[in-house]
Amino acid sequence: MEIKSVFEVLNVIFVLGFLISGFCFTRLTIRHLDKKIKEEGEGTPSWDRGGMGLRVGMYAVTLIKNKSDKASLTEDEIILRHARSIDRVLAFSMSISLVAIFILWPLGKWLGYLV
């Protein structure tokens, strides 16, 4: 197998992995955590009420780090208290596949293997 084919296959795998894990993370985890945050009297962060979905990345980082920050834009304690193990797995897989895309794609372009 040529190196070009390896880059193409890896990129397809990581893009599909990101799309699937991102879809599952937003549909399963974000809905679950938003519901739990509302039950505890808090609401959607004011900076994300327009529906842009910027909190998805913030929730994923909180779940991956598994600790709350002192000055956070999200309700880290509530997120960590109500997070399930599948939520952490989805956050990790979504983040890893996104980082892999950002590494492999420019590397393949720079080496001349991707168009």
Image (spheres, rainbow, N blue to C red):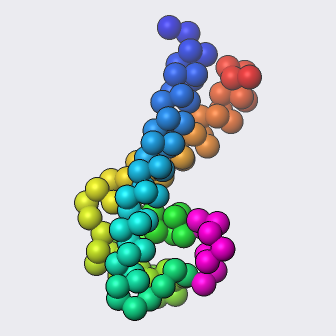
In front of the other: 109 or 88: 88
* Residue located at (59% from left, 65% from top): 53
Taking 81 as reference, is 103 left or right?
right
Give the quadrant of residue 64.
bottom left
Residue at image point 26% right, 64% down: 84
Please determine whether, in this image, residue 92 is positioned above or below residue 12.
Answer: below
Instruction: Name the side, left or right, on which 46 lies relative to 21.
Output: right
User: x, y (%) of residue 73?
Assistant: 54, 82
Name the residue: 53% across, 63% down.
57
Percent x, y of residue 90 = 37, 53
Is residue 89 in the magenta section? no
Q: How many marks?
A: 0
Left or right placement of residue 110 versus residue 39 in this view: right
Q: Determine the image quadrant of residue 60.
A: bottom left
Q: In the rendered image, which quarter contains the C terminus?
A: top right
**Position of 63 compared to 44: left or right?**
left
Judged from this view, the residue extending furthest toward the bottom is 41
Foreground residue among 15 and 34: 34
Residue at (52, 64) in percent of width and height: 56
Q: Is residue 52 magenta?
A: yes
Q: Which residues are magenta?
A: 46-54
